[in-house]
Image (cartoon, grey):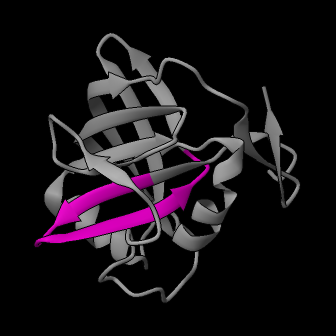
Amino acid sequence: MGRLVQGVCVVTTRCGGHDHAMTANTVTSVSLDPLLVLVSVETESRFHDAVLECGDWGVSMLAADQRPLSDWFSTRGRPLHGQLDRTAFRRGERTGVALLDGALAHLEVRTTSTHEAGDHVIVVGEVLGLSVPDSIGPALVHYRGRYGSIE
């Protein structure tokens, strides 16, 4: 699967007064009508429990210069409190989840179904809101275990 070029995103949720975030390269479009997306979440992660409990989540599609954020949000054992202190973000208007500044696009999503799949759960959600900045640069991608970018 490392030969599949994948865009890199940070997925966020807010639960119990705490922000939770994780790096994901498995955010996928599912349907256009209604507008649905999915993310694959490891069942042993803190994010798994939070997103299943709270149901609203955000997707920030990372720009090429945001690799340090991808690295940070994929670091196992990072502290729960203050994990968003390293980046500027805004709260989504529809869900209140964190959406990272500088991203290529943002989605605000509400879970509609979940599906167990091995050591992950597939979380499907309806897009409640989306935003795209006026100008964008290259996208951060992951391929064969390495980061790269495409225009």
Query: Which residue is nearer to you in this view: 49 or 22?
Result: 22
Give the percent coordinates (x, y) of residue 28.
53, 34
Residue in view at x 11 percent, y 72 percent? 16
Residue in view at x 57 percent, y 20 percent? 135
Above or below, 12 relative to 74: above
Most extreme residue toward the top is 33
Above or below, 98 relative to 106: below
Magenta-span inclusion, residue 23: yes
Q: Residue 6 falls in which quadrant of the image?
A: top right
Give the percent coordinates (x, y) of residue 102.
51, 42
Give the percent coordinates (x, y) of residue 81.
29, 83
Specify start and end residues of the magenta stretch as a single range.
11-26
Does residue 136 appear to the left or right of 146 in the view shown? left
Give the percent coordinates (x, y) of residue 40.
49, 53
What secondary structure is the magenta-colored segment mainly? strand
Does residue 67 appear to the left or right of 90 in the view shown? right
Residue in view at x 32 percent, y 10 percent? 33
